[in-house]
Amino acid sequence: MNDMQPSALPTFDFEDVKAAHDRIKGRVVNTPTLKSITLSQLSGAEVFLKFENLQFTAAYKERGALNALLLMDESKRKAGVIAASAGNHAQGLAYNARNLGIPATIVMPSTTPMVKVEQTRGHGAEIVIFGSSYDEAYAHAMTLAEQRGLTYIHAFDDPHVAAGQGTVAVEMLEAVPDLDRLIIPIGGGGLFSGMATAARAIRPEIKMTGVQAALYPSMYGRLTGKTVTAGGDTLAEGIAVRNPSEFTAAIIQKHMDEILLVTEAQLEGAVSLLLQIEKTVVEGAGAAGLAALLGNKEKFKGEKVGLVLCGGNIDTRLLANVLLRDLARSGRLARLRLHLRDQPGALYNVVRQFADHEVNIIEIYHQRVFTNLPAKGLITDIECEAKDREQLEGLIADLNKSGYDVRQAVTGPHFQKRAVKGAREAF
């Protein structure tokens, strides 16, 4: 592991979290911590969810931002604050700054989901779009802070912010004092460092598991000494941080039991499950804890586990895409491509088999021109809906027996396969 130098870093302990808890109490929502019976059955653990997506700005980030703002002196408040954020810290800071009468400027990378940009602007902040990553936005924000005399409020590299985030753990352990483990998403590390500091002070034996998107394993690499690459389009943009701070890394190193990595498919599945089972909307980062739990069931079996649904700001189009992709992976939604002879009754004979298997046809596409088939051949794509994978596979098997060349397209190259081999890719 990398060596840290705690003496050179800001002091931070449970007293800071307790003070923040008293300071922001009544100004943020004490969100419910509820047991999920269905997720407990699915995972083999006793699962408790902390619904931080029910904050006014739909994310826990309000806590740290508010604590930092309340600790500012009057002269700095008048000058204003600035931050770089992919969205949730931006909204939390803008919302609370407006309530306190403090001017706020937010620098956001161009990759930020539009829903987060517009919601942040709606809270009265000046929005500056700059760069294609958090790090580029951060560098520009620091330049603006110096030019305009603004106070920079960091999303995670700030003990006041981390203290505010730690109040999540205080509330969880007030609601469920005997939790065995907390599973917490890690981007820059502010949430984990604050929660771990509080949880270990309240319940020393509690286990602490961090979660990162596999595309952005920066803290994992830093604390394990492994060489990693961070980059790419992740559903969990809220924890897509290439360069975590030494301040949070030192605290995480002190308290963590492990850091787990989750794939994009696991994140998508967790977002979909939370909507289907808990009827709650979460963004990719908010679903990371559940993704790690379901991806490592044996590790957590029998434990009383607390998960933080840390944010719910997901673009509606992206959410729809995630849900449809999950249906495709589960075998409930599919597109079948068949080669037919261009003659009367050809399509009827195929459609009849769909009816025999009670598979619903959603759309049919015919292609006669842009194909390398003989002139009397055509390609037919049929989008269909089945009740489960077995029903779909039964249809595919019968189509193959009838001599049709059937190919199934699902959600991309990783999931594409010839239907004759069976659609057996499970999430």
Image (spheres, rainbow, N blue to C red):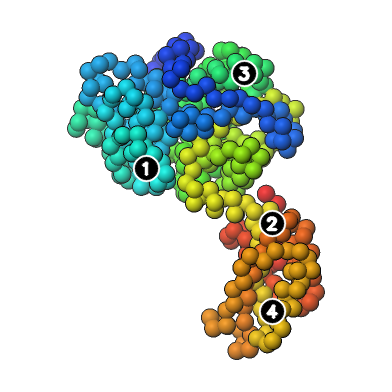
State the CA–CA distance, disc 1 to disc 4: 47 Å
Residue type at tag 2: Arg
Residue at the disc numbered 4: 347
**Residue under label 3:** 175
In front of the other: 362 or 73: 362
Q: Is 41 situated left or right of 259 in this image?
A: right
**Whether residue 2 can be seen here:** no
Asked if residue 238 shows in the view, the reply is: yes
Give me the residue at 70% from left, 82% from top: 346
User: Residue 354 at x, y = what percent?
Assistant: 74, 69
Asked if the residue under mark 1 is in contact with the one under mark 2, i.e. CB atoms within 8 Å, the reply is no
Of pointers 1 and 4, the one earlier in the residue sequence: 1
Q: How far apart are the two marked residues, 2 and 3, measured between alpha carbons? A: 38 Å
Point out the tag, 3 or 4, that comes first from the N-terminus: 3
Question: Which residue type carries mark 1?
Answer: Glu
* Direction from residue 11 to residue 213 in the image, left or right: right
Residue at the spot of label 2: 332
Q: Are marks 3 and 1 in contact (CB under 8 Å)?
A: no
Do residues under tags 3 and 4 come within 8 Å of each other at their CB atoms? no
- Cα–Cα gap, marks 2 and 1: 34 Å
In contact (CB < 8 Å): disc 1 and disc 4: no
Secondary structure beneath label 3: helix
Residue 118, numbered circle: 1
Quadrant in the picture for residue 20: top left
Q: Residue at the spot x=79%, y=77% of the render? A: 402
The residue lying at 65 percent from left, 35 percent from top is 293
Q: Residues within 10 Å of mark 4 (few under 14, many from 20)?
A: some
Q: Sequence order check: which comes first, mark 3 or mark 1?
A: 1
> Callout 1: 10 Å neighbours few (<14), some, many (20+)?
few
Position of residue 161 measured from the top left corner of the image (x, y, whole percent): 41, 23
- Give SS at disc 4: helix
